Image (cartoon, helix red, strand yellow):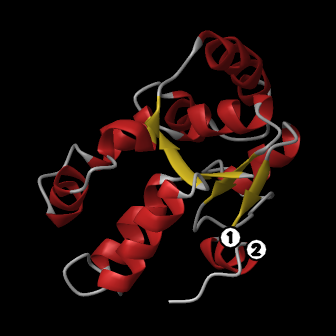
Amino acid sequence: MKYILDSNFFIQPNRSFCPPEIGVSFWNKLKQLHYQKYVYSLDKVRDELFSNEDNLKKWFKSQSIEKDFFIKSNDDMLNKLKEISNWVQNSHYNEKARNKFLDRGKADIFLVSFASINEDSTIVTYETSQPNRISEIKLPDICKQFNARCIQPIEMFRELNEKF
């Protein structure tokens, strides 16, 4: 199983309870899980993370994992994007939510595309399901539409029997 980490997997701990200079064991665990070939992310997530000059970007730049941690988009993913885009355009979400989700500069649509064509992959995010919400498309909800598995970070650590 590969766990594909959403941007908020990194951003939320960094900005709140576990910045890299304080939560060293959390970030070392993340690096260890990558070396064990369990956790990855996508190049679009890297682009979101690296758009800010902060300690999270510095942490990635200081580690030896940056080059192979982020998977590049490929043709299979781009083909799946068309199917996802069509579904989103015909969904119950409002125009603002659809446009935000379909923004190719953002990672969410790429995460769903990757996980839906790679059955051994699971998206890991802090987002929670809100299927009746029309103003924002949440990853757990669209993942259900495309048979992509999506879980919370705590579930990933439990599945991996990790403690730190």
* Residue 83 higher or lower than 68, as above or below: above
Is any part of residue 106 visible from this angle? no
From the viewer's perspective, tell me whether residue 21 is left or right of residue 4.
left
Q: Position of residue 88 (x, y in %)?
A: 72, 29
Check disc 1 and give the amino acid type: Met
In the rendered image, residue 36, in percent from the top left (x then y), is placed at 56, 58
The answer to whether the residues at label 1 and label 2 have Cβ atoms under 8 Å apart is yes
The answer to whether residue 158 is left or right of residue 15 is right
Of residues 80 and 142, the one nearer the viewer is 80
Which residue bears the numbered disc 1?
156
Q: At 58% across and 51% down in the image, what residue appears?
A: 37
Secondary structure under the numbered disc 1 in the rendered image: helix
Mark 1 closeness class: few <14, some 14–19, many ≥20 residues within 10 Å: some
Q: Residue at x 43, y 44 (%)?
A: 69
Q: Nearer the viewer, residue 28 or 90?
A: 28
Relative to the observer, which residue lies in front, 76 or 24?
Answer: 24
Point 68% across, 70% down: residue:
156
Judged left or right of residue 53, residue 125 is right
Which residue is most to the left? 53
Q: Is residue 80 visible?
A: yes
**Outermost residue, front side:** 36
* Amino acid type for the residue under numbered disc 2: Glu
Secondary structure of the residue carrying tag 2 is helix
Report how many numbered discs are placed on residues in the image: 2
Give the numbered dot on residue 126: none
Numbered mark located on residue 159 in the image: 2
Cα distance, mark 1 to mark 2?
Answer: 5 Å
